[in-house]
Amino acid sequence: MPSPAPQPLSFDARPLTDPVDPKAVSAFIREERSRGGKGSTAATVIAIVVIAFMVLGGGLVVVLGAAVAIREGSALMSLPFLGVIAIFIAIGIVASVSLRRSRTTRYRLSRFAAANGMTYEDQVNDPPLPGMIFQLGRSRQAKQLVRGHTPRFVEFGNYQYTTGSGKRSTTHHWGYVAVKLDVPLPNIVLDALGNNGIRTNLPASFHRDQHLSLEGDFDSYFQLYCPAGYEQDALYLFTPDIMARFIDNAAQLDVEIVDDWLFLYTKRAATTLDASTWAWLFGAVGALITKFDQWARWRDDRLLAAQGRTFSQSVGGAAAPGSHALPFAPPAGMLKPPPGVAPQGRRLKRRRSWLFIIGGIVLAVLWFGGKMVEFGFSQ
C-alpha cells in the first residue's frame, strides 16, 4: 500500500516581514556580543570604522577646502573638495544602511527561528561538517544558521569559502540544509540536472563508473553516483517512493549523503527573509524526513567479515590466513553487521576536471616556450 503523500509543512513567517523595534534590534546585538558572537562583532566593528573614517575624512576635507577657498578668495576652488565630500558622505550612508540592514536581518531570522521552535546562531568558522563544500578552500564560514532539533536535527545555513590568491581569489557562496541521519550510509551524490549549465555546478566531479542509472524517469532529474560495489545498496535506499519524493520536492537541489548526514545544496541563500524560499526548503525536508526511518535499517554486509574475524579471535580459534571462516557456526542471528560503512563505501572517487588539466598543460607549454625564447636570445 503506497504511503500517504506528505502534508504541507506550516510555519510562522511573520517575523520575516513584521515591523521591528530598533531598540529590540540593538538589545539583540548586545546580547549576541555578550555570548561571544565573534563574527558579528567583527563585521560591526569594520562597518563602524568605515563610517567613522568617512565622517572624519569628510570633515577634514571640508576644513582644507574652506581654508584654500579663503586663502585664494575663490569659491570655485572649493568645488573639488565639495565633490570629494559628497563621495565620502555617500559611502558613509551606504555603509550605515548596510550595517543597519544586516543587524535587522539577523534579528528577524532569530525571531523567525524562535517562533518556529528552532534556534539561531549567527556564524560558525570552519564548521565540522563532512559534506563536499565544507572541505574546500580557506576562510570557511557558515552564517545565519537556523537549527531545528525535532524530530531530528536539521540545520539551514549560508556558507562561503575562498579559493585562489591575490587578484585571482574567488569567494564561493552556497546555501545548504544539513539533516542528521540515524546511521552512517555510503557516500551517495545526486547531481540535480535542473540547476546545471553546460556542466555540473558541484565543486567536485566523480568517476563515470560510479554513475548508477535508476528506473523510471529519475535519470531525467538526477545523476546518481555511488561507490563501486554499492549499487544494490543504493537501490535499497532509493526505492520508487523515495525517488518520487526527491523528484517532487528536491529536483532543483543537489544532494549528498556522507557518513550519517544528508546535505541539500543550492547556489542561492538558504537562510533568507524570503518566505517562499523557506516554504520550498521546509517542504523538501518535510517530504524526505518521513522516509529516513527506513534508511536506519540499512547495514553494510561487508562489515560482517571484520566482525567474523573479531568473533573468531574472541573464542580462540584462528582462521587460516586470508580466510574469513569461523571455527564453528555461531547461533543464528548472533552475527549482524554493526551500523557503519566499510572503507570502500565511505567516499566516492573523484576525478580532476579536464579544464584544470588542460590549463596546466597550457601553462607548462607557455613556460617552456618562454625559456626557449630566453635561451635563443642569450646565444
Image (cartoon, helix red, strand yellow):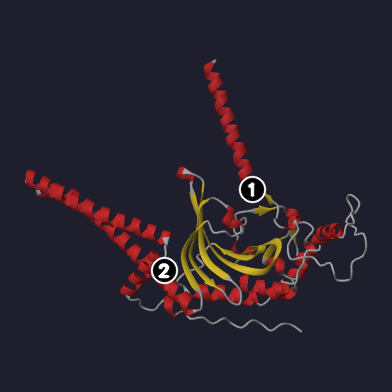
Image quarter (top left, top right, bottom left or bottom right) of the C terminus: top right
Q: Please give the residue where the numbered disc 1 appears in the rendered image.
A: 353
Q: Alpha-carbon neighbours of circle 1 within 10 Å: few (<14), some, or many (≥20)?
A: few
Q: Distance between the Cα atoms at labels 1 and 2?
A: 38 Å
Q: Which residue is nearer to you in this view: 101 or 155? A: 155
Amino acid type, mark 1:
Ser
Residue depicted at x 56% and y 20%: 375
Estimate the x, y position of residue 3 in percent, counting from the top left.
Answer: 71, 82
Residue depicted at x 50% and y 79%: 116
The quarter holding residue 211 reads bottom right
Q: Please give the residue where the numbered disc 2 appears in the rendered image.
A: 106
Residue depicted at x 55% and y 19%: 376
First in sequence, mark 1 or 2: give its number: 2
Residue at disc 2, secondary structure: helix
Amino acid type, mark 2:
Arg
Q: Is disc 1 in contact with disc 2, using a CB cutoff of under 8 Å?
A: no
Query: Left of 70 or right of it: where is 170?
Result: right
In the depicted structure, whether residue 294 falls above or below residue 350? below
